[in-house]
Image (spheres, grey):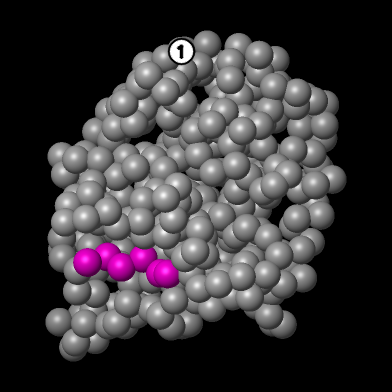
Amino acid sequence: MTTKLQITTPDDWHLHLRDGPVMQSVLSYTSFWCKRAIVMPNLVPPVVTAAAAAAYRDRITDALEEGVDFTPLMTLYLTEQTNADDLAAAVKGGIATAVKLYPAGATTNSASGVKDINKVMPVLEVLAETGAPLLVHGEVSDPNIDIFDREAIFIERVLAPLHERLPQLKVVFEHITTRQAVEFVMAANDQIAATVTPHHLIINRNAYLAGGIKPHYYCLPVAKRETHRLALLDAVLAGTDKFFLGTDSAPHVDMAKLQPCGCAGIFNAPNTLACLAQLFDDAGCLDRLEGFTSVYGPQFYGLDVNTDKLTLVKHETPQPVPQPVQTTEGAITVFDPQMDVFWSVRPA
């Protein structure tokens, strides 16, 4: 039995840290195992300028414990009013690593997002010239479209036409959830990649709908049928370099989750690596875990792969789900994978 596995220290290519007391409470659960993270800009107000991104970056680094080596990679929130010159300056000046496209109304704090992709095409043309990627929340927000179909319809209506029009634009199709997304990414050129979350590899829609509503499994995009989960799992376990880790760890205090109109988001930062190690171990693919967590992401972004190491330990008995994280605003429940996890993480 494998008892220890050493891998290159991972990165997280899709992370929500929030701000203020919540950010200060959850940050260490990522920086413990993660060297760099793409930080989402959907604050209130959203991070739409270089100055706002730099200020947010400083708040994150100020909250790090002394001696912790962690780099937040900042993103700009794309709006129909985004200034192309400011965006280009932010990228070229090293403040912004990427730009985030939220369809208006598609997810948490997305009201300022894009309603008509054609209105931001001039900005996207400038972005393509910089070489920085566009990070796409891939769902239409049309209320007439069934929520389980919104990712597939987004590919048809928005993403495929965008890729055809700007094939040189780097795009990360984020937190994909469907077989159609896997097929689109695999068929596209090398400018298209996707992030996959640990929870979308583990749960299907039964997790939050069967046997009673379970708000802690509600996220956006919502988990889909088992056939879609298996398509994601097959793509990731195959070791295809177009798919890499983006946790989409999205903390909300329990009182915001457990209400008639609860918030979308799953907080998985404390046990992401342990869950992934179990998935890859169960499939006999532990040798492919490092590529997914630590190699394919930086390669796509054009960054160096980390040089330090992290150790995963396999125990003889299942490890408990981490306890809720306590913040001054309330408790935050950690993702429960509903399966035995025998792995834990420790620094190399």
- In which quadrant of the rendered view does residue 333 lie? bottom left
In the image, what residue type sits under mark 1?
Answer: Pro
Q: Can residue 210 be seen in this view?
A: yes
The picture places residue 121, in percent across and down from the top left corner, at 64, 15
| Quadrant of the frame with the N terminus | bottom left
Q: Which residue is drawn at 77% across and 70% down?
A: 62
Q: In which quarter of the image is residue 192?
A: top left
User: From what the image shows, is residue 136 above or below residue 66?
Assistant: above
Left or right of 14 in this view: 155: left
**Which residue is at the far front?**
260
The front one of 305 and 228 is 228
Estimate the x, y position of residue 131 in percent, counting from the top left: 64, 32
Q: Give the range drawn in magenta.
A: 333-338
279 falls in the magenta region: no
Q: Is residue 341 left or right of residue 295?
A: left
Magenta span main SS? loop
Query: Disc 1 marks which residue?
Result: 161
In the image: residue 291, left or right of residue 12: left
At horizontal 19% and vertical 74% (from top left) the residue drawn is: 340
Q: Position of residue 45 (x, y in %)?
A: 73, 44
